[in-house]
Each structure stands twice: as structure tokens, then as C-alpha cells.
Image (cartoon, rainbow, N blue to C red):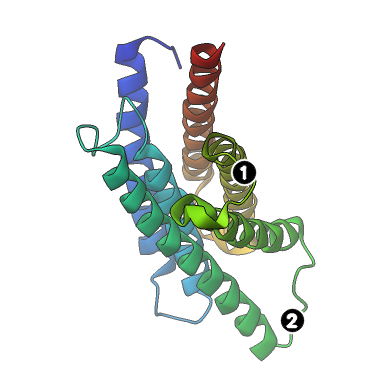
Amino acid sequence: FLHSETHLRGNSALIHLICIGFSLFIGLLSRPGSSLFSWHPFLMTLAFSFLMTEAILVFSPHGSPLKRFPHKVKGGVHWILQCLSVSCAVLGLAAISYNKFLNGKAHFTSWHGLLGLLTVCVVVLQSLAAVPLIYQTLAKGWSLAKLKRYHAASGLVSYLLGSVSLLLGLRSAWFTASVREHTWYLSALCPALSALVIMNQVTRAYVAKKRLQS
């Protein structure tokens, strides 16, 4: 992934396609509604691969579909997408928890389960911590610039946790039994590439701000 303007625009466009395509693929594979379990992979992929990715790309200077809109509009869309992402993540966790309860199976016994639980908890807390950015009267003693830096950093951590959770989910018995080997590797590339582009976007924005302030 090169860093010229053309390549950065290309990277962002590619990630838009990847997050949509990957989410549709998991949706077709899981067939949400066919069973209680089917909602888990579908909702988690929708939360972390599509909604959260698009929520962050809203602020991309190279690939935002709202590039020409004011920052306030982008912030509003980001907030809506992020709320939908958190809702899907919580519902996805509830679906697999209740499914295991009905089948008498132990939960959170694998790295995927443990990291998934941690990821959902972090995402919920990170979203609640962002409330002062909307209602600035709550940010007593904190500068808006510092809050935004912390929000960007914690948001990146949340996104990377979500990406790793998705990758671990691809190692589950359900997914490995549903796809062929080459499809597995192509699927694993989707959250991996998305994480690289999002990490590059957030870190470049942070470095650019630091340079302007220095």
C-alpha cells in the first residue's frame, strides 16, 4: 500500500468494496434467520467489517463518500453508523450466548469467544466515552482537541480488536467447514487489509495534526 494521493484514494475505494463484499459473502453463507446461530456471524461481520469501517472512512480525506460535506455532517453520519455498529455487535453477542445456553454448551472457552467478548465491551465503553464530544458541556476539564485524540486512538484499538475477532472467527468449525481453502485465505485478507488501511488513515491524520501544532 503506497502513500501517494492516487494510491490512497485507490486503497480507500478498495476497502469500500471489500467491506461490502465480505459482509454480503458472510450474509449469504450464514443465511441470517435460518437459525439462531446464523445471526451471530452475520451481525458481527455487519458491525465490524461494514458499519465500523464505513463510520471511520467517513472522515477519510481520500475515500469519504461525504468528502465535500462539512465536518458536522460527517460527525453525525459517523455517530449513526457507530451506534448501528454497537447495536449489531451487542445483538450478535446475545445471539451466540443464548444459542449456547439453549444447547447447554460452555461459552467463552476459545480465543475467539474471549476476544469477542472483550471487543464488544471495549466498543461499548469507547462509544460511551465519546458522548462528551457530542455534548461538550460534559467534557469538564478536558480540551476538545485532547478528547478527539483519545477518541481516535481508542477507536483504532476497538477496530483492530474487531478485525482480529473476525479473523479468529474465520478459524471456527462452522466457517472452515463451509468454505474451501482458497476461499478461506481470500476471506482472511478482507479484515486484514481493512485494518491496514484504517490504521494508516488514523495514524496519518494524527501525525498531520501533530505537525500542524508543532
Crowd band around label 1 with a 10 angstrom C-alpha radius: few (<14), some (14–19), many (20+): few
The amino acid type found where label 2 is placed reads Lys
Q: Secondary structure at mark 1?
A: loop
Observer-nearest of 135 and 105: 135
Q: Vertically, is 205 above or below 113?
A: above
Q: Residue at x 53, y 16 (%)?
A: 213
Observer-nearest of 90 and 33: 90
Tell me residue 80's x, y (percent).
Answer: 36, 59
Tell me residue 117's x, y (percent).
Answer: 69, 64
In the image: residue 194, left or right of residue 106: left
In the image: residue 177, left or right of residue 39: right
Q: Secondary structure at mark 2?
A: loop
Q: Quadrant of residue 152?
A: top right
| Quarter placement of the C terminus | top right
Q: Which residue is mark 2?
A: 105
Mark 2 or 1, closer to the camera: 1
Tell me residue 49's x, y (percent).
Answer: 45, 49
The amino acid type found where label 1 is placed reads Trp
Please say whether residue 62 is visible from this viewpoint.
Answer: yes
Q: Earlier in the sequence, mark 2 or mark 1?
A: 2
Q: Which residue is mark 1?
A: 142
Q: Vertically, is 200 above or below 184?
A: above
Crowd band around label 2 with a 10 angstrom C-alpha radius: few (<14), some (14–19), many (20+): few
Direction left: furthest residue: 68
Q: Residue at x 64, y 46 (%)?
A: 141
